[in-house]
Amino acid sequence: MMMKKSGGDDGGGDGGLLYTCLGVLCCVLVLSVIAVVSIRFSVSGSPFPSSVSSVNSATVTIVELQKKVIAATVANPNPSRAIASDLSFYRNSSFSPIPRKSTVVRKDDKIEEGLARARAAIRKAAVVGNLSMNPGGIYRNAGAFYQSYKEMERKLKVYVYEDGDFILVHNGPCKDIYASEGRFISEMEYGNNKFRTRDPHSAHVYFMPFSVAWMVKFLYVPLSYNLAPLKQYVSDYVRLISTKYPFWNRTHGADHFMLSCHDWAPVASKGNDFLYNTSIRVLCNANSSEGFNPQKDVSLPEIYLYNGVVSPKLQSPPSANISRPYLGFFAGGLHGHIRETLFDHWKEKDSHLRVYQQLPKDMDYPSEMLRSKFCLCPSGYEVASPRVIEAIYAECVPVMLSDHYVFPFSDVLNWEAFSLQVNISDIPRLKDILLAVPDDKYMKLKEGMRAVRKHFELNRPVRGFDMFHMILHSIWLRRLNLRL
């Protein structure tokens, strides 16, 4: 009783004070936790904050540091030094920001720093002229190209997604008209190249290895003209990788790429808006009037590998003094308005400018290319044609007859050094145009073809500067232009 009474009399006042103190302490703790969480989010959140809350001056300062780090990574030849100077501000201040999970720069920060250094090295090399580096004048800027290629070989890492059914993904046709597609997929999946990484956090770009050619073979109903199954498969594939992994959502797919040589690949890529508008699409059907954007997309050379190999007559460069008695040559089906115009004016009408819709039985295509000075390369229903690369192999100057075709590797290659471009409206004057080419220019064009040939060769195993490496280099250039 006495204890209860004493507790009631003495504990009432002290208990109220105690509860009041506890309440104040709880409020302080809650506010502290909120402040810490706010500061932590400002440090470890996205490097591209969509908005900045004015919680306190420290939070705003951290955001400013993030912006400086990004700016230094993009613009400074030595971004790590610029970052260190900004961090020194905090060493001398009374406020110490909460570090990220790692006290060292994150992998993606290191990647961006490396890309910044590569950009600086390429810019420096671009102003150094060296004619010996540019045989036949085939490069737009030889110094920039060789430095960029060297940086790519040292740095570029590609992560290949391992998801998807083998029939439609991780596999592709390695012979005939779509060989460019299958050979690249095969090399990235199974080749012994140094570019593939198994660590997605170390990758510069991410490859989605589905084959549109195989989609058409296994999903498309012949003569239905219904391409919805292709778009649906692409949509499902992007949904899979974007929900299973974090990498697509960081950039809306801007550092991801697909590759296909099928005419319907641009339509299939519409299965996802970001893939179509943001991702790198490596396409043979590089038609700028149908959504191909050369600033982000890559034009893929179309190569016809008969039974998986180049025609034996074209496997080695022809002799320089080979006889070429004919001015020009073309044989092919009536596909599209450009060929219709060509046939209207030249089909079997001139013995020196030989144009056939059906190749005579006593002729074969490679031999006729080797016997001609100029090889006509008109677009068909779509812009690309395997005759372009075959003409280069035969050292028969390609005569490009096309509208809206973005030539392969034209970001680094000077196509005027090894081909002729003729307007469609000038097809009636085609013979006069070819006859007007001076001998010295023709010899320079032949020199250019001989120099550029290596960039359009498919090798097993791959070799430096061949087509596999040139495709990767084009992708590398697009990644250099993307600043995260």
Image (cartoon, rainbow, N blue to C red):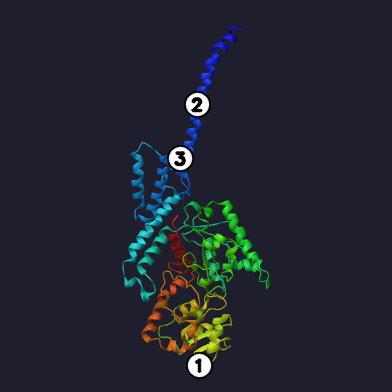
Q: Position of residue 341 (x, y in %)?
A: 54, 85
Q: Is residue 241 visible?
A: yes
**Which one is closest to the eye, mark 2 or mark 1?**
2
Q: Position of residue 309 (x, y in %)?
A: 53, 74
State the residue in front, 307 or 268. 268
**Which one is closest to the eye, mark 3 or mark 1?**
3
Distance from label 3 to label 1 (Cα)? 83 Å
Residue 210 falls in image quadrant: bottom right
- Marks 2 and 3, the one that precedes in the sequence: 2
Pick the quarter of the image with the C terminus: bottom left
- Mark 2, Cα crowd under 10 Å, few <14 / some 14-19 / many 20+, is few
* Residue for badge 1: 351
Distance from label 2 to label 3 (Cα)? 22 Å
- Tell me the SS state at disc 3: loop
Q: Position of residue 78 (x, y in %)?
A: 34, 53
Q: Is residue 460 visible?
A: no
- Marks 3 and 1, the one that precedes in the sequence: 3
* Residue for badge 3: 55
The answer to whether 357 appears left or right of 392 in the picture is right
* Residue for badge 2: 24
Residues at marks 2 and 3 touching, judged by CB atoms closer than 8 Å:
no
- Tell me the SS state at disc 2: helix
Res. 418 mark? none
Tag 3: amino acid: Val
Distance from label 2 to label 1 (Cα)? 102 Å
Residue shown at the point (57%, 77%) measured from the top left: 381
Tag 2: amino acid: Val
The answer to whether 224 appears left or right of 422 in the picture is right
